[in-house]
Image (spheres, rainbow, N blue to C red):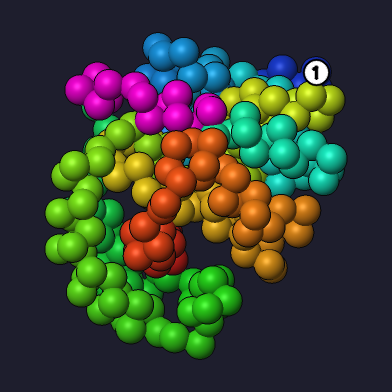
Amino acid sequence: MSGAWVYRSADGAVHAKCVPAADKQELQLERDRIDWLATTAIPGPRLVDWVESDEGAVLVMTTVPGIPACDVPRRLVDRATTSMADLLAQLHALPIEGCPFVRRLDRTVAEASDAVRRGAVDITDFDHSRLGRTAEDLLAELTTGQSSAADLERGDLVVCHGDPCLPNLLIDPETGDCLGVIDLGRLGVADRYLDLALTTRSMSAPEMNKQYDARDAAAFLNRYGVSGPDPWRLDFYRLLDEFS
C-alpha cells in the first residue's frame, strides 16, 4: 500500500523494495530500522544490500518465512493469536534506552497535521465508523485527545512495531507459530497501545480478516497481558492511524 515496487528473487531468499527519489528518505528509515532490529532477538528481515541514485533507492532484505497472519486458515487462528501476542510482548520488552527511533505523539501528531495540510490523507480508506468524515474533522478530534493520550504515553513507553496489522506478522502455515515481523518503517519508542490498537483492529473489524473476530482480539490482549484494555486508548491510536 506504500506505492513501492516489491520483487522476490527466483529462489525466494530475498526481497527487493524499490522506490522513486521522492520516497528515498522514507525507505532509508526502514533500512535503518531493519538493521537495528537485527541486533535483537526479534525475528525479522535482515539487510542484504542498499542501492541509491538520483532516480530512487532499492532495499534488498532477506525473506521472513511464513504466510501473512491475514491468510491463515481458521484452524490455525487460535495458535497464531497466542504466538503473535507472545512475539509482540517480546518486542515490547526490549529496553527503550537502546532504541534510537522515536514515534511518540509529539512527532506522529505533527506528521498527521502535515499530511492533512498537504492533502495526503486518503479519506476513502478510513475505518467504516469514520467513513464520510473529513480529514480536518478527524485531525480536530485527534488534537483534542492528544494531551490526555500524552499523559498516558509517558508511563507506558515500549519499542513498538508501529504497524503490526495481520499482513505484517508472518505465520508458519503448518504450526501457526509467529515467525517474524516485516514492514518496519514505523518501528520506534511509543505507547504500547499503538501496537495493541492496530493488531486488534485487524482481528475485530468485520470488513477485514473474516477468519478472526472480536473474541480473537480479546484473546490476543489477554495473552499479551492486558485483560482489561482501555477502549479510549485503543480508539485514539486507531484514529491516529487514519493519517498514515
Q: Nearer the viewer, residue 86 or 202?
A: 86
Please say whether residue 68 is visible from this viewpoint.
Answer: no
Expressed as whole percent of the image width and height from the top left, the position of residue 171 reads: 71, 31
- Magenta span main SS: helix
Q: Residue at x 63, y 59 (%)?
A: 214
Query: Which quarter of the figure is the C terminus placed in?
Result: bottom left
Q: Residue at x 78, y 41 (%)?
A: 72
Expressed as whole percent of the image width and height from the top left, the position of residue 174 reads: 84, 25
Q: Which residues are magenta?
A: 86-99
Q: In the rendered view, does 222 fall on the left or right side of 33?
A: right
Amino acid residing under circle 1: Asp
- SS of the residue at dot 1? loop
Q: In the rendered view, does 57 fall on the left or right side of 146?
A: right
Q: Which residue is mark 1?
A: 11
Expressed as whole percent of the image width and height from the top left, the position of residue 69 reads: 69, 40
Asked whether residue 180 is drawn in magenta, I would say: no
Q: Residue at x 52, y 72 (%)?
A: 126
Vertical order, 216 against 48 (above or below): below
Q: Nearer the viewer, residue 99 or 233?
A: 233
**Farthest-out residue, front:** 227
Query: Which quarter of the figure is the N terminus placed in?
Result: bottom right
Displayed quadrant of residue 235 = bottom left
Vertical order, 133 against 220 (above or below): below
